[in-house]
Amino acid sequence: PVRIAGIAEPRLRAVATREAAAYAAARPHSKAALDAGSGAFLDRVPMHWMKDWPMAFPMLVASAQGAEITDIDGNRIDDFCLGDTGSMFGHSPAPVAEAIRAQAGQGLTYMLPTEAALQAGELLCETFGDFRWQIATTATDANRFALRVARAVTGRPKVLVFNGCYHGTVDETMVTLEDGRTVARPGLTGQVADLTRTAACAEFNDLAGVEALLAPGDIAAILTEPVMTNSCMVLPDPGFHEGLRALAKAYGALLIIDETHTISSGHGGYTRIHGLDPDIFVVGKCVAGGMPTAVWGLRPDLAERYLAYDASRPAGHSGMGTTLSANPMQFACLVATLSQVMTPAAYAHMERDAARLEAGLAAAITRAGAPWHVVRVGARVEFICAPGPLRNGDEAARAHQPEVEAVVHTALLNRGSLIAPFHNMMLVSPATTNAAIDRLIASFDTLLTELFASDP
Ligand code: PMP
């Protein structure tokens, strides 16, 4: 038979049908409630990504606490998606919930700082290093604003990004490589501007390719994650980040490191753990414990350059900022998270338990004889339905097996473990128990044994 990621196609289809039916059978209340009450939304969901889960309909969540989600049908699920990193430290961490309660009666937004804001600034420097910070609401916005600053101070038009990257819905980054040329991603909705005028795309781990794009002198900044996490995970080759830093400097471009996912690496992010040296540091999602918040910081010397530019630009809109950003609830949650939740002790727990998950999944893959592999960056673990390691975005794109992934995700969910949609990512929070990890490993093992059993 035809094989997909090593699995005989008829077997894959049979398991897919069985698991889809089991998912629906366990969720009559979610189904009925959606049928009756979702018509007010465009395409029946409040955000279109909710259609990208592999299930036929989303479950309605009743509550989430720690590393567990309960749906309205009463299914209790170990959550390894954790809001795709927004809740990486667990749902409603107690210090953050308390900070929200305390701020709730003191006003929610007023376009003025608080004393907690000053404390948050100090904590950001202590945690991530000596940067001059701004608060945004999403990592998308933080990246957009960082790119504006980079273009302003360098006077150059383009950002260099890597094939297969994702930095939020930032127009300038929505490019890909086609036969070695930078082109706009074909799926973009309502795209009019020519993105190749403001972006250039290289392969990750290809320093010669990066240098060739820097040589003409029109690149304002290199924007990269330390590890590519948004396709199948790609680790940097030894020396790659040192090379990027040196090339950016040599060609007068800035280096922007987006830690929004690699904040899983450990306290202070991949930058601190591995000694990276960005000009601009960006992190969002979990930085305020799940309260919508992102931060971006400039190195002091770059801050000086920017302020000189700012003093000389014409009056009027800068194109940076949003009204609800830097609100008092964000400051309260930043302080609570940075001082009590995102701690070295929490990371030690996450690191240890994520290693347990990585080892268990890898052992199951070996036992089943699957041509798959596992990658981990601190608390972030991913199984990939293809051999590895992967070296760049092109290899990562070809490693994706959407049909297989949909079956595995649904089967794991039916056995009580939720993993992130879009890819095969699992996060281990400080609240994740060994029992939950072992359940996930056991389900994965059983499923792979079935999928890879020799043909009858
Ligand atoms: N940067 C990276 C590396 C991301 O993975 C994401 C989201 N997945 C973003 C930025 C954008 O975050 P948000 O959707 O919160 O704007």
Image (tube, helix red, strand yellow):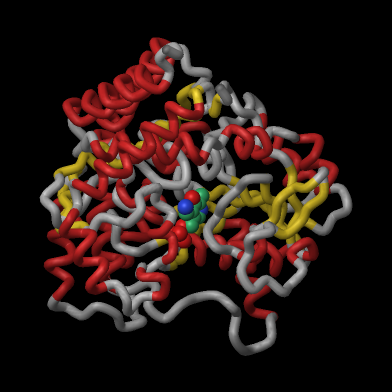
Between residue 368 and residue 61, name the one nearer to us.
368
- The image quadrant where one finds the N terminus is top right
Residue lying at 73% horizontally and 72% vertically, measured from the top left = 193
Residue 257 image position (x, y, % from top left): 56, 48
Between residue 179 and residue 312, name the one nearer to us.
179
Residue 14 in which image quadrant: top left
Between residue 161 and residue 73, name the one nearer to us.
73
- The image quadrant where one finds the C terminus is top left
**Would residue 44 be visible to someone looking at this image?**
yes
Compared to 84, does 298 lie above or below?
below
77 lies left or right of 55: left
Residue lying at 43% horizontally and 60% vertically, measured from the top left = 49
**Would residue 131 be visible to someone looking at this image?**
no
Residue 305 image position (x, y, % from top left): 66, 64
Residue lying at 68% horizontally and 86% vertically, measured from the top left = 314
Residue farthest toward the right in the current orientation of the protein: 216
Residue lying at 52% horizontally and 59% vertically, measured from the top left = 168
Compared to 10, does 301 lie above or below?
below
288 lies left or right of 144: left
